[in-house]
Image (cartoon, rainbow, N blue to C red):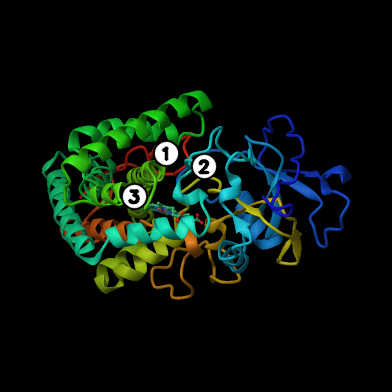
């Protein structure tokens, strides 16, 4: 590791804060002895409290307007980190190779979970050239033929799930009947995971994505899920199927990636696919049902669907807090603030998608909006690998519901919908709908 890349010593963590966003003065000792032009004088304590419905995080709302390069401290980990919120700066940081993901391994950066969700050898925690090699392997395996087959499967499965829900007594839970099972089927098909194993994967997923599980429990579960995919890889080498996992297992046997890389990559795909798609599709339906004038516009013009999905991706705050940090490998100035070599930096794609400098009335849902691409799936080399798959599923769910259930509505008042707590991604526990 070069001198410039060595992490700066982390300042001591304070007692666990209770109030959201308590800004405290940054003591002289923490700022170091080198000048920091434009550096903020406070660290915002960000406990990432539970938020109901699609309420937007108040700290993010404020920082994107008032302090787009700020210092924050979250519940876990050590010291503080930069949080970049403005659209333009988020794009700058995420496409600048001077911000490294590999350097986050073994670095206890302040964060919102007591453990690191992403595995150390996972794709999200590597830099080029390893990162480029892994992305290329996935791109090769996820070819056009496979994408077309998945699209057909997604549409057929959605159709069946919506029919089954509507055959069920009305009202019914949309998440339990449609948006939960759909990604299970899609990921089962994509990776060749046997249907009977999905229950176990869901249980492991719930622990790993929890903001409350102890590090010990999380480590045990991570070891279990890794062992599961090691075994499945051995099986797929003996009996290959027509799926992405068989192809990646063959690539591993041919030396294109290591076994830990294969397992970490697959675990990342499964964790994201099972949780985020379920939540995102359900949240999108909730957003539409609670914005009746927007829903009416969409019903009146189904050609609006693609722009509606993009606007919902921008508008729905689908996660709590922030994702994975990066470490500056040299001094970099962002928005007039000098981020020092070794400093940890988060970006908030949620905040960037509500940046008033880019989006007019950013807190308003406007399905006809046509301003700038949303950053819901990230930006730069780590752009989400599942973006196309997610769009495909959200599209299928919304278009099928619009067609088959033109009278779809919430079956309870919005304030009676119960929301998931203690987890990274946001979504309702259940979404009772009638039609
Ligand atoms: C609503 C659904 C989803 C959202 C909002 C979402 C969002 C994101 C974001 C913001 C990133 C990180 C960008 C960064 O590191 O700067 C990411 C990375 C990633 N996502 Fe997704 N994602 C979703 C669904 C999926 C699905 C369905 C899959 C798998 C099939 C997936 C697989 C991944 C992987 C493997 C990465 C790491 C890519 C890399 O580091 O190169 N995601 N996603």
Residue, disc 2: 51
- Please state which of the two labelled residues, at mark 2 or mark 3, is closer to the viewer: 3
Residue, disc 3: 277
State the residue at coordinates (56%, 71%): 358
Image disc number at residue 312: none
- Please state which of the two labelled residues, at mark 3 or mark 1, is closer to the viewer: 3
Instruction: Check the image and name the residue furthest to the front.
Output: 254
Q: How much space separates mark 3 and mark 1, taking CA atoms? A: 16 Å
Q: CB at mark 3 closer than 8 A to ligand 1?
A: yes
Is 82 positioned to the left or the right of 286 in the image? right
Q: Secondary structure at mark 2?
A: loop
Is the C-beta separation of discs 1 and 2 under 8 Å?
Answer: yes
Query: Considering only order in the chain, which callout, 3 or 2, is on the residue closer to the N terminus?
Result: 2
Is there any visible trace of residue 171 in the rendered image? no
Query: Considering only order in the chain, which callout, 1 or 3, is on the residue closer to the N terminus?
Result: 3
Q: Residues within 10 Å of mark 2 (few under 14, many from 20)?
A: some
Q: How much space separates mark 1 and mark 2, taking CA atoms? A: 8 Å
Q: Residues within 10 Å of mark 1 (few under 14, many from 20)?
A: some
Query: Considering only order in the chain, which callout, 2 or 1, is on the residue closer to the N terminus?
Result: 2
Q: Secondary structure at mark 3?
A: helix
Q: Nearer the viewer, residue 81 or 159?
A: 81
Is 338 positioned to the left or the right of 267 in the image? right
Q: Secondary structure at mark 1?
A: loop
Residue, disc 1: 419
Q: Nearer the viewer, residue 129 or 352?
A: 129
Q: Nearer the viewer, residue 331 or 137?
A: 137
**Residue 283 percent across, percent down from the top left:** 37, 50
Q: Residues within 10 Å of mark 3 (few under 14, many from 20)?
A: many
**Residue 255 percent across, percent down from the top left:** 35, 50
Position of residue 97 relative to residue 224, above or below, is below
């Amino acid at each position: 590791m070069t001198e410039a890349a060595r992490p700066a010593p982390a300042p001591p963590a304070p007692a666990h804060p209770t109030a959201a966003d308590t800004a405290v003065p940054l003591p002289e000792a923490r700022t170091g002895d080198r000048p920091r032009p434009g550096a903020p004088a406070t660290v915002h304590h960000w406990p990432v409290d539970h938020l109901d419905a699609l309420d937007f995080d108040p700290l993010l709302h404020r920082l994107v307007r008032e302090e787009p390069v700020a210092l924050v401290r979250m519940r876990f980990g050590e010291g503080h980190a930069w949080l970049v919120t403005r659209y333009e700066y988020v794009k700058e940081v995420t496409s600048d190779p001077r911000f490294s993901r590999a350097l986050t391994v073994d670095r206890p950066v302040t964060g919102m979970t007591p453990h690191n969700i992403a595995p150390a050898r996972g794709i999200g925690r590597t830099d080029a050239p390893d990162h480029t090699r892994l992305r290329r392997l996935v791109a090769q395996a996820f070819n056009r033929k496979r994408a077309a087959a998945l699209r057909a499967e997604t549409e057929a499965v959605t159709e069946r799930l919506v029919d089954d829900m509507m055959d069920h007594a009305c009202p019914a839970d949309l998440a339990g009947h449609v948006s939960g099972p759909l990604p299970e089927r899609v990921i089962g098909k994509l990776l060749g995971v046997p249907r009977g194993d999905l229950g176990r994967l869901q249980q492991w997923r719930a622990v790993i994505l929890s903001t409350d599980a102890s590090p010990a429990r999380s480590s045990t579960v991570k070891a279990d899920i890794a062992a599961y995919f090691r075994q499945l890889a051995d099986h797929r080498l003996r009996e290959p199927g027509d799926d992405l996992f068989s192809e990646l297992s063959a690539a591993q046997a041919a030396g294109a990636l290591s076994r830990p890389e294969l397992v970490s990559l697959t675990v990342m795909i499964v964790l994201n696919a099972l949780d985020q798609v379920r939540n995102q599709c359900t949240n999108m339906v909730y957003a539409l049902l609670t914005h009746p004038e927007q829903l009416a516009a969409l019903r009146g013009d189904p050609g609006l669907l693609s722009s509606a999905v993009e606007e919902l991706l921008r508008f729905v705050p689908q996660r709590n807090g922030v994702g994975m940090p990066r470490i500056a490998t040299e001094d970099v100035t962002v928005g007039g603030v000098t981020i020092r070599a070794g400093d940890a930096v988060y970006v908030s794609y949620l905040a960037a998608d509500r940046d008033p400098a880019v989006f007019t009335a950013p807190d308003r849902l406007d399905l006809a909006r046509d301003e700038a691409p949303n950053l819901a799936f990230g930006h730069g080399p780590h752009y989400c690998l599942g973006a196309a798959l997610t769009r495909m599923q959200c599209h299928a769910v919304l278009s099928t519901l619009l067609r088959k259930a033109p009278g779809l509505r919430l079956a309870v008042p919005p304030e009676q919908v119960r929301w998931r707590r203690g987890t990274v991604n946001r979504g309702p526990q259940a979404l009772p709908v009638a039609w």
